[in-house]
Amino acid sequence: MSKKKENTTKKFMTLSEIRPVKQVEEAYLLKFKGVTGVDIGYKFVGGKKTDELAIRVYVEEKKDVPPKERIPKTVKGIKTDVIQRRFKLHPLRVHLNDLEIKADTGTYDPVQGGISIGPCRSIGGYVYTGTLGAIVLDNDTGDPMLLSNFHVMCVDDQWSVGDTMAQPSRVDGGVCNTDVVGTLQRASLGGRVDCAVSSLTGREHLCSIVDIGAVMYPGTASASEDQAVRKRGRTTGLTHGTVDTVDLTVSLNYGDNIGVRTLTNQIGIDVDTSQSAQFGLGGDSGSVVVDDDRKVVGLYFAGNMEETDAEGNITVPEGTYGVANPIQDVLDALDVRICARMAKKREPDKWSWMEGEWLKEYEKWKERVKELEKGKEWEKRKERAKERFKDQLPFTEEVTEAPVGTVEDRLAKLEANLSWIDPEYCKPEWRKPEQIKPEARKPEAFKPELRKPEMYKPELMKPEYKPPPIHGGSPEERLARLEAAFTQLTHFIKPEHRPDLSKSALRREGDT
């Protein structure tokens, strides 16, 4: 039994796997008759896009051809997809005898991106127009310059530095005696770019694009598949699209003097039909393609041609597919950078004022939280102290020997020695430092002589406090007062510092 031949075709290969093969094999594929381009993208089956990546080969016309001229179904194990699509440059060429004003023909001062521009010179009896894509800055001098395509500003191989540029272009009514906006400085065509820059003279400029707004710093970004993009061109105005590929290699005819040029690794863009009929048409060449963040990703220069069936009916309108140079390649070739605006801080308004008031309240709230936390910490410390001294509080002195003297004598001595004490200061809540009167903290407040009744100073006492009478009431009442005083004292006097009351009353300096 024979073994079946192994199928070497891989299915659902990744972009990183296909890209090296495409870069090697695209030159081979471009040699086939009628091929207009090669890229990597999703394969179409029955006119519908699938989720399988393939090497796509674009041809002028899909038709039966001899086997030797057919595009292979696979290239090194990767599937191919043949699509009918022709490409053309998108300047607008008008004969001098047929000048007709159309699209955006306004004169802009200050100048900005998305407006009409073209050379003053005529080529073979024709004048050309395209789009001033964006304001760029010279990397050496920082001078503002005007960015567009080679085939808009130079047109053919007869261009020279110093060629004058008009805004609006001659096609759009510009007069080169009065509407000159600059002169051609640098240009590049081939490899990956079709670009040129002109100086800016006689007008101010804005780092923005009509209908889009200011280009945001740093000014550029990289394009990626399925990315939403837009552009503003002289002919179609503001249009929207979606990046289809960033691997398009395309061949375009630049005229008899230049011929066919092949540009590699270009950005292919499908029109977003929900917002625009075409992505670009003649006169839109030179527009910059920007992303949703208003950063430039590409320089538009070409699009698809109209396709018809055998009866002449339009099957694919012109301009529904666009092609753009990667913007970083353009800037490197011309030694310039995109003029972009830094994000500004929000101007003060009622909202910022309210925000400031809110921040003030927030700071107050934070301080209040700190105070509450301090209170909680104080309570925790009190609880720890109670736990630590729970065996000592409250203190009860044990009397082991009979007291000396009569009750009257003992009471008189005790009352005399305790008459300076304010019971209010003996309460537990007065133990907090912040609740003790400043004068009570002074060293002189605790001198021995201040304990004598005759040396009593009223300013050290609370105004409403009146010392109890030395000899007032019955012995039971006087003892009750003394017991209450000692109960308060035992809350903050350590046991080792408490007086021995078992034998006699507290001594004073005058006692013998």
Image (spheres, helix red, strand yellow):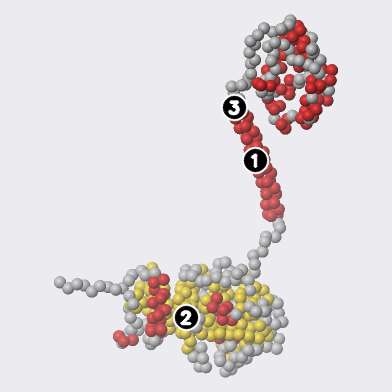
The image shows residue 444 at horizontal and vertical percentages of 80, 27
CA gap, disc 2 and disc 3: 84 Å
Work out how far the residue at label 1 is from the one at label 2, CA to CA, in angstroms. Answer: 64 Å
The residue at which mark 2 appears reads as 264
Query: From this viewpoint, which residue is outermost toward the left?
Result: 1
Is 452 placed left or right of 363 in the picture?
Answer: right
Location of the N terminus by quadrant is bottom left
Asked whether the viewer can see residue 488, the reply is no
Relative placement, left or right, of 328 versus 142 is left
Where's the C terminus, which quadrant?
Answer: top right
Q: Under tag 1, what secondary structure?
A: helix
Labelled disc at residue 469: none
Percent across and percent down for residue 393 are 62, 21
The circle on residue 388 is 3
Residue at image point 65% right, 79% down: 140
Residue on which the image places disc 1: 369
What residue sits 56% from the left and 81% below the top? 333
Q: Secondary structure at mark 3?
A: helix
